[in-house]
Every structure is written in C-alpha cells, then in structure tokens.
Image (tube, rainbow, N blue to C red):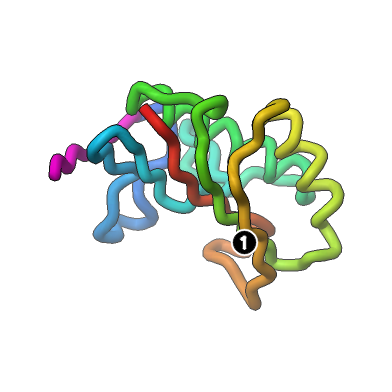
Amino acid sequence: MTKEIVRTEKAPAPFQGAPYSQAIRSDGLVFVSGQLAIDPETNQMIEGGIGEQTERVMQNLSTILEEAGSSLAQLVKTTIYLADLAGFAQMNDVYGRHVGSKPPARATIEVSALPQGALIEIEAIGHL
C-alpha cells in the first residue's frame, strides 16, 4: 500500500494545526478530508448561505483533487454533512452543477453542528 500526503496552498490548511492532511493519495485513489467553506486566502469562513458555502466547498474540493492528479469528474464517493437539512435542495443544485452527469455515490447527513458555524462539510474519494 502506498500513502502519499497531498497539500496545496490553494485550499484551506488543516483546521488550526489539527493532525490531518488535506488529502491522501493511495493505490489509485485520493481521499479528501472534509472541506468547509473557508477561503484559502483569508483562512476565514465565507459569508452567505448554504448556496454560497456549497460553492466554496466544491471549489476547495476541486483544487485539492487537481493537486492530487484527479478532478471532480473522477469522484467516486462523497459524504455531505449539513447543519440543517432544510438547505438540502439549494445545496443539491450547486453540488449537481459541479459533479455533472455522472455523479458519485453519496450520503447526506444532518449533524447538530459543524466547526466554525459552517452550514456544510463535504469529504470525498476520487479515482486518480
């Protein structure tokens, strides 16, 4: 088994020095840690609702996947955590535009809270 850390300055750094990597590349797959709607230039949560936050999260995922040698088109599985399922339809519209006509397998889960008051977090697995 191979295990290679993926890191790019074009996506948010791990949360406050927490012990995790943006992504791991291993045996033909890339495993992307959960991404929040954090602007990588300011390292701050963006303003806006679920639509704006989903857009930023998808941009962060895309950047990390590209650094690993993959892309949103090569996603095979995502897990989406929402602070409120009432935002599901709006999230789904934005998400759908990014994953295209061959979307990955997916689970969507409502959680009681996310770091920094985020409305959404998405983790992903992509093929290289």
Determine whether the residue tagged by mark 1 lies in a helix, strand or loop.
strand
Residue 34 percent coordinates (x, y): 47, 53
| Quadrant of image for the N terminus | top left
User: Horizontal placement of 25 versus 119: left or right?
Assistant: left
Question: Would residue 2 be counted in the magenta stretch?
Answer: yes
In the image, 19 versus 111, the foreground residue is 111
In the image, 38 versus 100, the foreground residue is 100
For disc 1, the neighbor class at 10 Å (few under 14, some 14 to 19, many from 20) is many
| Quadrant of image for the C terminus | top left
Rendered view: 103 above or below 90:
above
Rendered view: 103 above or below 16:
above
Residue 44 percent coordinates (x, y): 53, 46
Residue shown at 54%/29% (left/top)? 72
User: Horizontal placement of 83 versus 21: left or right?
Assistant: right
Rendered view: 106 above or below 116:
above
Residue shown at 29%/33% (left/top)? 28
Question: Would residue 18 be counted in the magenta stretch?
Answer: no
Residue shown at 82%/57% (left/top)? 87
According to the image, label 1 marks what residue?
81
In the image, 14 versus 106, the foreground residue is 106
Residue 60 percent coordinates (x, y): 51, 35
Residue 50 percent coordinates (x, y): 76, 50
The total number of labels drawn is 1
Magenta range is 1-8
Q: Quadrant of residue 64?
A: top left
Q: Quadrant of residue 82?
A: bottom right
Q: Residue furthest left?
A: 1
Q: Amino acid at mark 1?
A: Tyr
Residue shown at 79%/65% (left/top)? 85
User: Horizontal placement of 122 versus 3: left or right?
Assistant: right
